[in-house]
Amino acid sequence: MITTANALHSLKPNSEWVLRDDVLEWQDSEETEPTALELSNEVTRLQAVYDSQLYARTRKAKYDLLNQDEMRYDDVKNSTTTWVDAIDTIKAAHPKP
């Protein structure tokens, strides 16, 4: 879940601030403090970006379970397509939107 801290880091990456129990204490004299609306909009935007990448995170988790180097080696030695088939199965199960 995207937080106000994530939004602050995104909007004002080099600013100085403290967030305690959702109360923002702005400590930066050079950067202006973002408004509540700016923070809310950034949280919404960042959450939408995160949500849109669910398929990629799911695919990566599945790819990581494969011993891909060995699969590719075995495919070359045995003239098979085990690795490509496994990748295609993962992509089909978790399509890109």
Image: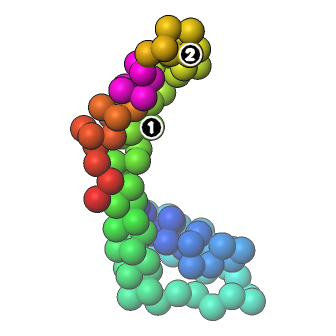
Name the spot of residue 12 as percent of width and height, x first.
Answer: 62, 78
Q: Is residue 91 left or right of residue 14?
A: left
Q: Which mark is residue 60?
A: 1
Q: From this viewpoint, is residue 59 visible? A: yes
Q: Is residue 57 left or right of residue 29?
A: left
Q: Which residue is mark 2?
A: 76
The 10 Å Cα crowd at callout 2, few under 14, some 14 to 19, many 20 or more, is few
**The stretch drawn in magenta includes residue 84:** yes
Name the spot of residue 6 as percent of width and height, x first.
Answer: 50, 65
Question: Quick one: SS at disc 2?
Answer: helix
Point out the residue furthest to the left here: 93
Q: Is residue 43 above or below residue 86?
A: below
The magenta segment is 81-86
Q: Is residue 5 above or below residue 53?
A: below
Q: Give the amino acid type for the residue marked by disc 1 in the picture.
A: Lys
Q: Give the amino acid type for the residue marked by disc 2 in the picture.
A: Val
The 10 Å Cα crowd at callout 1, few under 14, some 14 to 19, many 20 or more, is few
**Residue drawn 73% across and 88% down?**
29
**Residue drawn 28% across and 48% down?**
95
In which quarter of the view is residue 48 placed? Answer: bottom left
**Residue drawn 41% across and 19% down?**
82
In which quarter of the view is residue 89 placed? Answer: top left
Name the spot of residue 50 as percent of width and height, x first.
Answer: 39, 59
What secondary structure characterizes most of the magenta part? helix
Q: From this viewpoint, is residue 22 visible? A: no
